[in-house]
Image (cartoon, grey):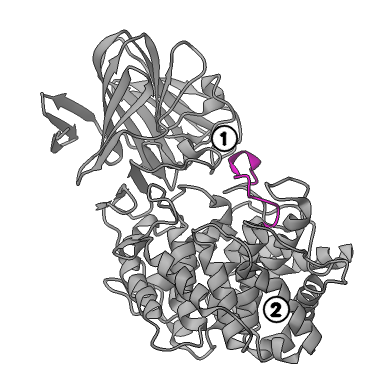
């Protein structure tokens, strides 16, 4: 039996054949399972739950494979090379849309999860129209239309979901089926309201700028621009122009290793992180300040990175989790089949074999050592080698999804050290409070930032003000000076508080040590540590609960604690996150009323505090 995970980890991902083999290696375990279960159009991949029921979870597991199979089968010769997969995909679609079938996908309701999955199905139908749709019987075509048309008869969220209705109606228009043009235009006009600038959108919520911009808003807009049968549509022009602009800033979310920024929700979609560069290649976008060669590198290097990680179950399925199987970090909408959203990367398989893309030389991008992005509310810092990214964020907020404060509102997120999500908040080890300030009125029940009263992203630092309790205000300046960063807290409180500053988390496979510079831990992926500037404060090393960090199942977090009494106080803490290094550069700081001067070895940086 073929070892799919081993084959994927060794796949060089250089040619179109390599990408086809990768997709087939990923799909085959799913379709073998579906065949064994005898349920065309749905597949039971696991028993963990989601906010939607098990039936919809199983249907999702099948439909998400179509994101990859549609592009693969857009050329008939691929259908002949992989006839079993083609037959299984088509049989599943027919069974799922036939009302008399046991596998019928059913009548839907407002906000139904299966409206999301219609995006994959509609795209598949467009890609394969001559060899699938056109060969269906009139009854089968009617069944498919009736099931899909439910999205035009119900309410859906005014978010990226609008694109799923756009894709359905795009297929209807292509197939000369009834559709309401005003709905198609109204959905696109609504999406126009979400556009910010420089290629950046928000996805329904202005304070939540995450991967739903590249793999949602940008991806679907570009996909539509290619798949629509319309010409000279102003929305097409907008989508393409915005993508051309977006790439040069979005590339800063990556490193040359292929690792992308772990930040925000839906991280279980893993290599969908680079799907923007896939659809950009499919749409043949001429970028501004960015090359197609760089886009190819970021796409394929990100996929290589992911295929080397232990992200598969014993059956060969993609697991829920990030760098390893992990339900603790999941959102409520993550079902066993959800990770296959990553198949959107395989839209490049619709690019003809003789197209320029397949012969382009990959080019490693040049990453900025420090750059501000006001749209994503980040100060992005790369090391000199381009192998580590640290994103200093402020003003991001997710009000409804699991672990929103951990996924959006920590001080910094790292491609090497990741970030942690809590199992509980009673004890410090349960909270796994890396790169955040945890606050308690005692020794238990800690709070971290969840919403800001004010924030700012400057060229050299980020600033925030938040209120953990009534009559308690905390202002924080976070100032990067890689591999260190400084946290300067101004605290106004009417009560006694326990404060805990956590540094980067590192895998628990190394050695702890202390020096005059602070408390440190040298791990296999780099050195982390924490330093205070008060003689009576010493750092400690916390062993948090396992499976709290997204990258490593067991970690160590350097931290320091401070008790504050009622009144006004200041607190200076420096944190080290030196990726792929054992070096601890000397670091010091002086502060005046409105300026901070930091020194790292023979380097000095003075920051004017404007708040």
**Residue 298 in view here:** no
Q: Confirm whether residue 592 shows in the render.
A: yes
Kindly identify which residue carries mark 1: 548
Left or right of 568, for residue 376: right
Relative image position of residue 503 (x, y in whole percent) = 39, 30
**Helix, strand or loop: magenta stretch:** loop
The question of residue 350 being in magenta is answered with: no
Q: Residues within 10 Å of mark 2 (few under 14, many from 20)?
A: some
* Residue 53: % across, % down: 75, 50
- Residue shown at the point (32%, 8%) measured from the top left: 565
For label 2, the residue is 145
Q: Which of the two marks, 1 or 2, is nearer to us in this view?
A: 2
Magenta region: 325-337
Front-lying residue, 141 or 243: 141
Image height of 142 relative to 463, above or below: below
Callout 1 secondary element: loop
Residue depicted at x 37% and y 18%: 470
């Amino acid at each position: 039996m073929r070892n799919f995970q081993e084959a994927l980890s060794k796949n060089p991902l250089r040619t179109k054949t390599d990408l086809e083999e990768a997709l087939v290696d990923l799909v085959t375990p799913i379709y073998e399972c579906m065949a064994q279960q005898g349920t065309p159009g749905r597949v039971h991949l696991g028993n963990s739950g989601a906010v939607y029921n098990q039936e919809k979870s199983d249907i999702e597991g099948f439909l998400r494979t179509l994101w990859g199979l549609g592009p693969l089968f857009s050329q008939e010769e691929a259908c002949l090379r992989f006839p079993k997969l083609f037959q299984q995909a088509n049989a599943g679609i027919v069974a799922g849309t036939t009302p008399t079938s046991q596998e019928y996908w059913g009548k839907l309701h407002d906000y139904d999860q299966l409206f999301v999955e219609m995006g994959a199905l509609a795209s598949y139908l467009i890609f394969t129209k001559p060899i699938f749709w056109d060969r269906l019987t009139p009854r089968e075509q009617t069944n498919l239309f009736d099931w899909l048309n439910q999205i035009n008869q119900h309410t859906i969220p005014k978010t990226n979901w609008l694109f799923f209705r756009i894709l359905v109606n795009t297929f209807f228009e292509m197939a000369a089926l009834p559709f309401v043009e005003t709905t198609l235009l109204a959905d696109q006009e609504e999406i126009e309201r979400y556009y910010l600038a420089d290629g950046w959108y928000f996805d329904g919520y202005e304070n939540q700028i995450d991967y739903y911009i590249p793999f949602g808003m940008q991806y679907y807009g570009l996909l539509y621009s290619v798949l629509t049968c319309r010409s000279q549509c102003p929305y097409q022009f907008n989508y393409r122009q915005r993508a051309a602009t977006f790439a040069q800033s979005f590339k800063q979310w990556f490193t040359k290793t292929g690792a992308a920024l772990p930040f925000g929700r839906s991280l279980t979609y893993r290599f969908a992180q680079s799907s923007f560069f896939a659809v950009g290649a499919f749409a043949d976008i001429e970028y501004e300040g960015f090359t197609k060669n760089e886009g190819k590198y970021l796409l394929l290097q990100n996929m290589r990175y992911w295929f080397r990680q232990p992200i598969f179950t014993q059956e060969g399925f993609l697991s829920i989790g990030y760098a390893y199987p992990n339900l603790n970090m999941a959102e409520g909408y993550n079902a066993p089949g959800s990770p296959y959203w990553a198949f959107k990367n395989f839209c490049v398989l619709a690019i003809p074999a003789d197209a320029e893309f397949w012969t382009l030389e990959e080019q490693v991008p040049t990453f900025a050592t420090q750059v501000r992005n006001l749209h994503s509310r980040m100060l992005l810092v790369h090391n000199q080698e381009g192998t580590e990214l640290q994103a200093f964020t402020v003003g991001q907020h997710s009000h409804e999804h699991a672990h929103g404060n951990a996924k959006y509102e920590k001080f910094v997120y790292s491609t090497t050290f990741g970030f942690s999500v809590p199992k509980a908040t009673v004890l410090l080890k349960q909270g796994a409070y890396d790169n955040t300030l945890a606050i308690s009125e005692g020794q238990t029940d800690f709070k971290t930032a969840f919403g800001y009263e004010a924030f700012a992203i400057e060229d050299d630092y980020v600033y925030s003000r938040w209120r953990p309790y009534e009559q308690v205000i905390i202002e924080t300046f976070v100032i990067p000076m890689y591999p260190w960063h400084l946290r300067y807290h101004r605290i106004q409180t009417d009560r006694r508080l326990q404060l805990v500053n956590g540094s980067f988390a590192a895998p628990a496979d190394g050695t702890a040590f202390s020096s005059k510079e602070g408390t440190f831990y040298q791990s296999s992926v780099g050195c982390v540590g924490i330093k205070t500037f008060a003689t009576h404060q010493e750092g400690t090393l916390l062993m948090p609960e396992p499976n709290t960090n997204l990258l490593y199942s067991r970690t160590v977090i350097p931290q320091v604690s401070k008790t504050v009494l009622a009144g006004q106080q200041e607190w200076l803490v420096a944190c080290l996150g030196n990726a792929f290094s054992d070096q601890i550069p000397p670091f010091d700081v002086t502060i005046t009323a409105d300026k901070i001067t930091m020194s790292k070895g023979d380097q000095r940086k003075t920051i004017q505090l404007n708040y």
